[in-house]
């Protein structure tokens, strides 16, 4: 008995020493961060990939049909301040980023338009990572230690090994209907979901064999299986798949995959470093909310009720503070884009109370200029940086017809309409009419450049400073852009949803001017 007790004490001492040693190592790492160096070599420019090509990196001279706009690559990582940081390397140059880091591993992720999951790389603290581009797809190597290429570039390996560098079934769930003219969107979604189940099982076997052969480390083996877990969970939450499964419950008995995949939310603090887990949290926190469909004269939108989502996240006991710090700010972004000023103010107060990341609060406040003390005004600045209000603009132009264009430099339909707007002004130059352009939710640098490029510099141009919190915007019914208003010489709003230039605006204005 005494002998057993000594052994037990020895084991407890060993565990205690190990725990103490690990804690000391963590403390040292926190006090003295190491650094990770990323070197990007000649990142490709943005281009179009035509979906019918159905091959990774394949290019064609024929440019027709649906396509995916491939932007120049960006790399995301979860930094030591628990924020998602984005790095966009310089195009066609050698560019370097140094990241001070505290934890043992850093995940670097970049979007892969050909698949339903990003390319991800699990990097050890202290590593130097060189990124090159093969067929415009990132391929990386570590210079300071030896790492098996299969482990490091697993995403590229799986695409070649399992899918012959074609679109994988996981991705065809979302776009397969564009490749098949014979079947409906629902049919192709279900077909490729059933194929994805089999491919998921094939990938598990592949990972098992790679681990057995020691082609990947145990850490990477676990990491890759969990990415697959999150992907399969994402499929099961697809609306079409969910509805189909409800109608075909007998099929579930044959789906061994259902019992294999699950994610452990009790490990949120450690898993939050990984893109697949953050994506999983986003998916399950949408609570199957139905889309709200909004139709305006000039455009429309689809979105969920993020107010319900915000409150549901707050009350969801599965989510700890780390999860809420990640989910609540992004949910507030959705509230800010789609709901009224009173909701923005109400939920911003909730965000402050329920988020323990002050940097994120400051970022949101500055990004959207959240000053709720001036909601009754629409504050503008002109090209000389003079400040005035929308009421001032109406008063200064009283006695003239006003055709007011709400636009932004990032808005493609807004910019495409500008030549027609310039033409319309010339056609109506003998009329008593003023063309006024108001830039909404834009960046000043981009706004100023776009004014010159689009040839509207000679008109009245104003930058909206408080579009996100102005009650005036709501009262005018400006929910999406482009949006057009017509005011009479008396200052009366005679059309709050006027036609676009080139789409009936000329006739509309002529008729109003004649009648008045």
Image (cartoon, rainbow, N blue to C red):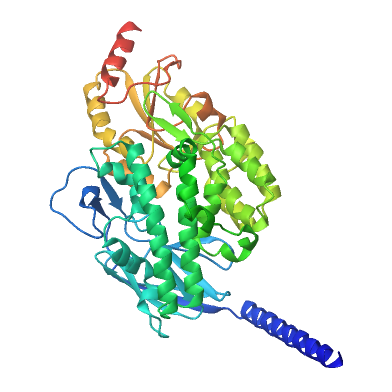
515 versus 255 height, above or below: above
Residue 120 at least partly seen:
no
Where does the image place residue 478, in percent across and percent down from the top left? 46, 28
Q: Residue furthest bottom?
A: 3
Front residue of this view, candidates 348 and 59: 59
In the rendered view of the protein, which quadrant contains the N terminus? bottom right
Q: Which residue lies furthest to the top in this view?
A: 515
Front residue of this view, candidates 264 and 23: 264
Left or right of 268? Residue 500 is: left
Where does the image place residue 38, in percent across and percent down from the top left? 41, 74
44 versus 194 height, above or below: below
In the rendered view of the protein, which quadrant contains the C terminus? top left
Left or right of 13? Residue 80 is: left
Q: Which residue lies furthest to the right in this view?
A: 2
**Which of the 4 quarters of the picture holds residue 434?**
top left
Front residue of this view, candidates 466 and 394: 466
At 46% from the left and 80% from the top, the residue drawn is 127
Residue 471 at least partly seen:
yes
At 51% from the left and 34% from the top, the residue drawn is 290
**Which of the 4 quarters of the picture holds residue 265?**
bottom right
């Amino acid at each position: 008995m005494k002998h057993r007790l000594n052994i037990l004490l020895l084991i407890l001492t060993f565990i205690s020493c190990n725990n103490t040693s690990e804690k000391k190592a963590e403390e040292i790492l926190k006090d003295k961060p190491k650094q990770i160096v990323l070197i990007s070599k000649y990142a490709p420019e943005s281009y179009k990939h035509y979906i019918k090509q159905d091959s990774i990196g394949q290019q064609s001279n024929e440019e027709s049909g649906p396509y995916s706009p491939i932007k120049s690559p960006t790399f995301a990582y979860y930094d030591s301040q628990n924020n998602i940081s984005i790095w966009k390397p310089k195009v066609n140059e050698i560019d370097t980023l140094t990241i001070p880091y505290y934890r043992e591993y850093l995940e670097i992720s970049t979007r892969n338009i050909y698949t339903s999951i990003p390319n991800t790389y699990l990097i050890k603290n202290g590593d130097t990572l060189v990124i090159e581009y093969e067929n415009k797809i990132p391929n990386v190597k570590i210079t300071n230690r030896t790492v098996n290429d299969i482990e490091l570039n697993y995403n590229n390996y799986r695409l070649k090994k399992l899918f012959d560098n074609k679109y994988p079934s996981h991705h065809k769930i979302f776009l397969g209907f564009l490749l098949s003219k014979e079947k409906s969107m629902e049919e192709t979604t279900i077909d490729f979901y059933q194929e994805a189940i089999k491919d998921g099982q094939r990938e598990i076997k592949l990972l098992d064999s790679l681990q057995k052969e020691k082609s990947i480390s145990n850490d990477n083996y676990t990491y890759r299986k969990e990415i697959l877990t999150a992907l399969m969970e994402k499929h099961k939450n697809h609306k079409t798949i969910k509805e189909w499964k409800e109608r075909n419950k007998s099929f579930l008995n044959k789906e061994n995959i259902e019992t294999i995949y699950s994610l452990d939310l009790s490990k949120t603090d450690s898993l939050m470093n990984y893109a697949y887990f953050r994506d999983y949290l986003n998916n399950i926190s949408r609570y199957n909310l139905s889309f709200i469909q909004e139709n305006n004269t000039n455009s429309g939108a689809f979105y969920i009720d993020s107010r319900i989502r915000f409150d549901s996240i707050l009350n969801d006991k599965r989510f700890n503070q780390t999860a809420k710090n990640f989910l609540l700010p992004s949910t507030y972004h959705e509230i800010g884009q789609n709901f009224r000023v009173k909701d923005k103010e109400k939920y911003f107060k909730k965000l402050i109370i329920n988020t323990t990341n002050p940097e994120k609060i400051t970022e949101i406040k500055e990004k959207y200029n959240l000053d709720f003390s001036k909601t009754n005004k629409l504050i503008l600045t002109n090209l000389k940086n003079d400040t005035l209000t929308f009421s001032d603009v109406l008063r200064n132009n009283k006695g003239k017809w006003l055709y007011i264009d709400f636009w932004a430099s990032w808005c493609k339909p807004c910019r495409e309409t500008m030549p027609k707007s310039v033409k319309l002004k010339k056609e109506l130059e003998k009329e008593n009419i003023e063309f006024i352009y108001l830039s909404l939710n834009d960046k000043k640098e981009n706004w100023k450049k776009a004014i010159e490029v689009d040839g509207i510099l000679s008109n009245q141009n104003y930058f909206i400073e408080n579009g996100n919190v102005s009650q005036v915007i709501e009262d005018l019914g400006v929910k999406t852009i482009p949006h057009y208003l017509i005011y009479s010489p008396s200052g009366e709003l005679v059309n709050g949803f006027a036609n676009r230039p080139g789409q009936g605006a000329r006739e509309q204005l002529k008729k109003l001017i004649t009648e008045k």
